[in-house]
Amino acid sequence: MRAANRFWQYLVVPTILVGAIGATRAAELNPAAVIYKLPDQIPWGPVNANGAQSAVVVGDPGKPGFYAVYNKWTKGNHFSRPHFHPNDRYIVVLQGTWWVGSGPKFDPANTTPMPAGSFVTHFAKQVHWDGAKDEDAVLLIMGEGPGTSTAAEEK
């Protein structure tokens, strides 16, 4: 009986390991059907003076047409100032908590938290501002370009 158990251990365990190793190999994808960038292949820009960093993943936000941009607000009470965009923008919070305010008065204490998984629409020509407080917030921002920004802060 013990010999039979050892036989199965020596046969089954290596078979499972070989199967698991084979399953981790990636299939080659047809580039005419699918292209992709892994996280370490996405070119992030430098962190700007407001504490934000971005990476364009599709299109060009400075030109007409669809675009998608990753935006990271770094922790430490980093916020944009009140502004608006010419077109609607659609935002998904991928990581962290993103803090959003609206109107021309800049007041980071009067913001609404958007946790990971939230979906937000910034409507065209409506004043808003946003950022991060005690943790980084990573967003996916999508819209139709040009995605320019016009300052609208109440002084």
Image: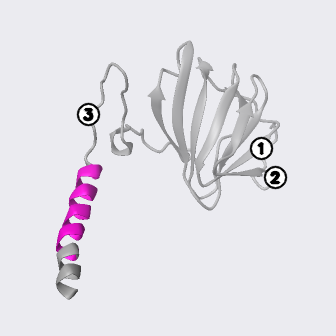
Say which residue appears at 47% left-offset and 25% top-offset: 58
- Circle 1 or circle 3, nearest the eye: 3
Magenta range is 9-24
Secondary structure type for disc 1: strand
Residue 82 makes an appearance in the image = no
Q: Tell me if mark 2 has few (under 14), some (14-19) or many (20+) residues whose alpha carbon lies within 10 angstroms of its own.
A: few
The image quadrant where one finds the C terminus is top right
Q: Classify residue 23 as left or right of residue 146.
A: left
Tell me the residue at 25%/47% (across/down). 25
Disc 3 crowd, CA 10 A, few/some/many (<14, 14-19, 20+):
few
Instruction: Please state which amino acid type lies under the numbered disc 2.
Output: Asn
| Mark toward the start of the polypeptide (1 vs 2) | 1
Looking at the magenta stretch, what is its main secondary structure?
A: helix
Earlier along the polypeptide chain: callout 1 or callout 3? 3
Amino acid on which the number 3 mark rests in the picture = Glu
Q: Give percent across and percent down for residue 26.
A: 28, 42
Q: Are marks 1 and 2 in contact (CB under 8 Å)?
A: yes
- Which tag, 2 or 3, sits closer to the chain's start? 3
Disc number placed over residue 28 in the picture, else none: 3
Q: Mark 2 points at which residue?
A: 110
Q: What residue type is labelled 1?
A: Gly
Occupied quadrant, residue 91: top right
Q: Which residue is drawn at 22% across and 75% down?
A: 9
Q: Nearer the viewer, residue 91 or 132?
A: 91
Element under label 3? loop
Tell me the CA gap for discs 2 and 3.
Answer: 50 Å
- 71 relative position to 98: left or right: left
- Find out whether the residues at labels 2 and 3 contact each other: C-beta distance under 8 Å: no
Write down the residue under mark 1: 101
